[in-house]
């Protein structure tokens, strides 16, 4: 069920901690759940997703938003691919809003905001940016600039006013906030912990993020994400054809 | 009285054809009609002006741009939204690429607001949004895929990021609601862009019949290009 409390993982699980600013990628199989935990306030986790069995199928911002009549993501929502199928469901969420319309930071933005930074002086504390972090991970799978899709920014809240203007909420993410994703297809997940591109912080301060994965099995017939709307029921229907045994 | 009335009628008909304004249609280097439900591809070089005219009103025009000299660089909805701090496109909007560069700017807009969150319809998304039985219906992504397949750019489905929907109205509320609403465009309204780099333009004149984006009646558009000047 969807929940604002974390689900209890069984003893058999996998866990890692992402260093502030770290980029990461991995393959999450159908029926595996992944919990992202903000280990410090004001975390941001940029995410891109691809069908690991057919990489041209990937997270589609527009299909995700219009099928569910929402401009943000929270528990009960699913993340659609461009093929009418579901990459993952959001099964638990303590913060109620995850941005998916503002994209990534880039090298020019980070240099303008925080100043010059390079490995030679700062070693592994040099300033990362979202776009290059994604390109780094995408390259490991033969992907590149063509595959820079509209991403999710977990833990970040950006609202849109009546004139269409964006408003970044600085106090949205608290230490301990979490979001749980249950993967509905075998998914390549690419993450960056760089700050949100609209975070007005004048210092470069990425945050550490916990990852924990365990096997939950796929969505039941009574799953709240499936039942959220008729569109999602059809999205699960389309996805399940891929896994008929 | 008579001449006044005929002048008004002529002006009205010029408006409906989207050829009013300061640019002379006869000076355009391209002037083409795209039928309802058809794709269109073309090059607009740096400095040239592209006008898209909603000939009969409330017609969504799904549009993507690629750097014509390096198609790995292409329009990015999220970079555009983040860059201008606003989700709607209108005069003054800089259309940005996945590498952060400005590809085109909107220099005139008689509609007032265009969408870049709603994406393009597809057979698959139609099954999700409306009914499994809608899979057979013609869609923008089929237009995009076929136009790319017949072109020489080596572009495929990988190269279809979130697009612009000129003349389409997708309001977002402060609470985060999103819906496809009735259009705010009308016959003869147009949007005009100046290319800041050589761009390949990929258009699907949207065939969607299941929501109000085309007022349930897809209609033709006109595309005009003027030389740099």
Image: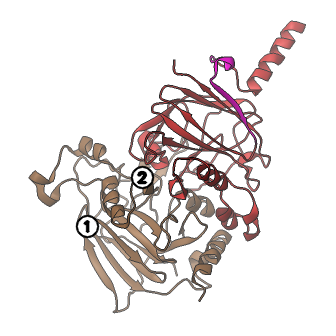
Q: Is residue B145 above or below residue A49?
A: above
Q: Is residue A123 left or right of residue A22?
A: left
Residue interval drawn in magenta: B22-35
Report the chain shown in red. Answer: B
Q: Is residue A177 above or below residue B34?
A: below
Q: Nearer the viewer, residue B14 or B229?
A: B229
Q: Is residue B93 above or below residue A131?
A: above
Q: Residue at horizontal 40%, vertical 53%?
A: A145
Answer yes or no: is residue A94 visible: no
Measured as percent of width and height from the top left, residue B184 is found at 69, 39
Q: Residue at horizontal 55%, vertical 83%?
A: A219
Give the mark, 1 or 2, whose residue is nearer the N terminus.
Answer: 2
Q: Which residue is mark 1?
A: A208
Q: Nearer the viewer, residue B30 or A235?
A: B30
Residue B141 is drawn in which quadrant?
bottom right
Residue A234 is drawn in which quadrant?
bottom right
Measured as percent of width and height from the top left, residue A204 is found at 23, 52
Q: Which colour denotes chain A? A: brown
Q: Is residue A204 left or right of residue A24?
A: left
Mark 1 or 2: the one toward you: 2
Q: Is residue B69 magenta?
A: no
Classed neighbour count for the residue bearing mark 2: other residues with Cα under 10 Å, few (<14), some (14–19), many (≥20) = many
Q: Is residue B208 left or right of residue B67?
A: right
- Which residue occupies the extreme front position in the image? B152
Q: Is residue A222 left or right of residue A27?
A: right
Label 1 to label 2, Cα distance in Å? 20 Å
């Amino acid at each position: 069920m969807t929940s604002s409390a974390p689900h209890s993982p069984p003893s058999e699980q996998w866990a890692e901690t992402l260093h502030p600013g770290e980029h990461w990628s991995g393959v999450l199989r159908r029926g595996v759940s992944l919990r992202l935990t903000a280990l410090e306030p004001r975390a941001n986790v940029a995410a891109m997703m691809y069908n690991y069995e057919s990489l041209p199928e990937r997270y589609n911002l527009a299909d995700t938003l219009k099928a569910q009549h929402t401009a943000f993501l929270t528990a009960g929502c699913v993340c659609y691919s461009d093929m009418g199928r579901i990459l993952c469901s959001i099964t638990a969420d303590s913060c109620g809003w995850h941005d998916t319309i503002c994209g990534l930071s880039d090298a020019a933005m980070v240099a303008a905001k925080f100043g010059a930074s390079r490995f030679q002086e700062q070693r592994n504390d040099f300033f990362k940016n979202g776009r290059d972090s994604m390109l780094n991970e995408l390259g490991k799978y033969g992907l590149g600039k063509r595959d820079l899709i509209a991403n999710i920014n977990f833990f970040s809240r950006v609202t849109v006013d009546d004139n269409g203007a964006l408003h970044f909420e600085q106090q949205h993410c608290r230490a301990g906030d979490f979001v749980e994703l249950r993967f509905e297809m075998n998914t390549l997940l690419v993450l960056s912990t760089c700050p949100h591109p609209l975070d007005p912080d004048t210092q470069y301060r990425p945050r550490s993020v916990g990852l924990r994965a365990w096997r939950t099995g796929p969505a039941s017939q009574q799953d709240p994400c499936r039942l959220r709307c008729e569109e999602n029921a059809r999205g699960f229907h389309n996805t399940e054809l891929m896994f008929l045994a | 009285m008579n001449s006044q009335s005929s002048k008004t009628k002529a002006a009205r008909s010029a408006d409906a054809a989207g050829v009013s304004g300061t640019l002379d249609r006869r000076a355009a280097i391209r002037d083409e009609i795209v039928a309802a439900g058809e794709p269109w591809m073309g090059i607009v070089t740096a400095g040239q002006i592209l006008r898209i005219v909603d000939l009969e009103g409330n017609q969504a025009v799904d549009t993507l741009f690629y750097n014509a000299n390096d198609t790995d660089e292409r329009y990015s909805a999220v970079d555009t939204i983040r860059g201008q701090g606003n989700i709607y496109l209108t005069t003054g909007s800089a259309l940005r690429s996945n590498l952060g560069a400005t590809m085109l700017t909107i220099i005139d807009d008689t509609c007032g607001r265009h969408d870049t969150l709603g994406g393009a319809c597809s057979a698959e998304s139609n099954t999700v949004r409306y009914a499994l039985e809608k899979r057979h219906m013609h869609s923008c992504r089929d237009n995009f895929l076929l136009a790319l397949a017949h072109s020489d750019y080596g572009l495929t489905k990988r190269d279809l990021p979130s697009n612009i929907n000129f003349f389409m109205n997708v309001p977002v509320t402060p609470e985060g609601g999103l819906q496809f609403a009735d259009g705010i465009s009308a016959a003869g309204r147009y949007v005009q862009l100046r290319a800041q780099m050589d761009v390949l333009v990929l258009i699907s004149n949207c065939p969607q019949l299941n929501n109000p984006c085309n007022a349930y009646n897809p209609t033709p558009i006109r595309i005009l290009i003027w030389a740099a000047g």
